[in-house]
Image (cartoon, grey):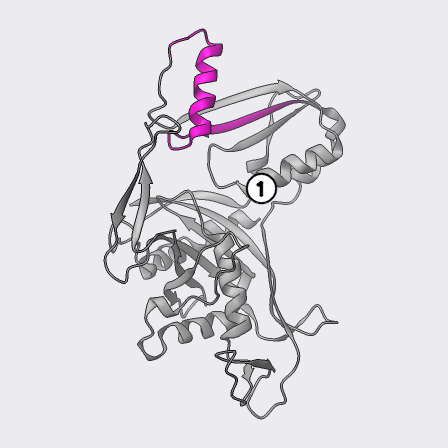
Amino acid sequence: METAKITFYRVEKCGLYDYDSEASSLGSLTDFLNQLMGWSIKGGKPLEETCTYSIEESEDVDRTFCCDIVKNGVTGDFLLTTWNETPAYEGKVAAVKGASPVGTAKVEFTKLPKDSIPGYATYFWFVPSKNVFATIRFQHRLNGKKNLDKYFKEFISKFSDYVVLSEEVNDTFDFNIIGYAASEEEEAKHLYPSLKTSIVRKPGQISYILSQVNKIRKVTRHNKLSPKLQNNQDFWQRALSELGLKKQRKLENDVHFSYEFSFTPSDSELKEIIKEWEKEHDSKWDDIGFTLKGEQSPRWLSNSLARGEFDLNVKRIDEEIVEAKSILDQVTGKRDIMLALLE
């Protein structure tokens, strides 16, 4: 039995669109998931060939691969496992000792097995009937959602069944997309791919906080300090100093802490606080509460999101990867309870 952290996102747009239309001209979420499943296993395709995009120097995402994808024939739900690459140099992974003083740290390299891709697994439960999907986290802090957005949009653009390729030979490009069509008999259309997703907010909570901005009298922040982050170590030392402890004491384990202060933000400041928090909302101990005049308890932002924690009896393939089918079987079994988070 393992604890899974579930966060829901809504699929607002998914398909190939005319430039003057908000409705998809070709494709749907179910359609593209079925196509991805067929494409990823076609001809015994190796994992290394399932990345749908190349990395540009200006981008801050590494390669993403399809590790597994399974479907429940009754509900129409899918479970997609992606493999997110982490940086390596000439077949080696770099690391430094966290206890090294700044300016003296020495880099140590761990050699990777031949043809291996360093990274971590992330899991996505798609519920096309509700037009939503959920990130499912087990041991990792990162949920891979940013990588998923790019991965799936690029699949729609380059590898979906609607892609029409030029028959002309071109020495510059491996293939040249001239448009999209539902079948070989139809003329290619000039469409653009679009995937737009957003975190699911429960109605009311954030809207109410925004409407009461002038009544906010106190802001409370829950957070977690991690010994892996140097700025967290610095914060820890300053906090101990404020307590009157002058001798330095290294942060060895995660520490949960809260702080609050009297503050009435402006309308734009409140929107900025909410926007920034939503970018890093997945940690249970990362929350912001606003106490209004005449109230004693904070109104927490976390209560506005469709997320929760559930115990799942899943099967692990190894220490990193959880079997996709076992996850899908478990979430399908608890489907009604989990989908109640959307209400």
Q: Left of 21 or right of it: where is 49?
A: left
User: Does 337 lie within the magenta span?
Assistant: no
The N terminus - image quarter: top left
Picture residue at 35% right of the left edge, 66% below the top:
48
The correct choice, above or below, for 15 with respect to 199 in the image is: below
Furthest-top residue in this view: 244
Q: Is residue 313 visible?
A: no
Q: Secondary structure at mark 1?
A: helix
Q: Which class describes the residues within 10 Å of circle 1: few (<14), some (14-19), or many (20+)?
A: some
Residue 307 appears at what percent x and percent y? Answer: 50, 44
Bounds of the magenta segment? 218-247
Q: Left of 278 or right of it: where is 270?
A: right
Nearest the eye: 301 or 281: 281
Mark 1, residue position: 278
Residue 177 appears at what percent x and percent y? Answer: 56, 80
Nearest the eye: 219 or 119: 119
Residue 264 appears at what percent x and percent y? Answer: 71, 24
Residue 138 appears at what percent x and percent y? Answer: 36, 46
The correct choice, above or below, for 306 with respect to 40 in the image is: above
Furthest-bottom residue in this view: 185
Q: Left of 88 or right of it: where is 15?
A: right
Picture residue at 66% right of the left edge, 38% below the top:
206
Picture residue at 44% right of the left edge, 20% below the top:
236
Which image quadrant is residue 19 in?
bottom right
The correct choice, above or below, for 155 with respect to 147 in the image is: below
Q: Amino acid at mark 1?
A: Glu
Which image quadrant is residue 116 in?
bottom left
The correct choice, above or below, for 241 with respect to 32 in the image is: above
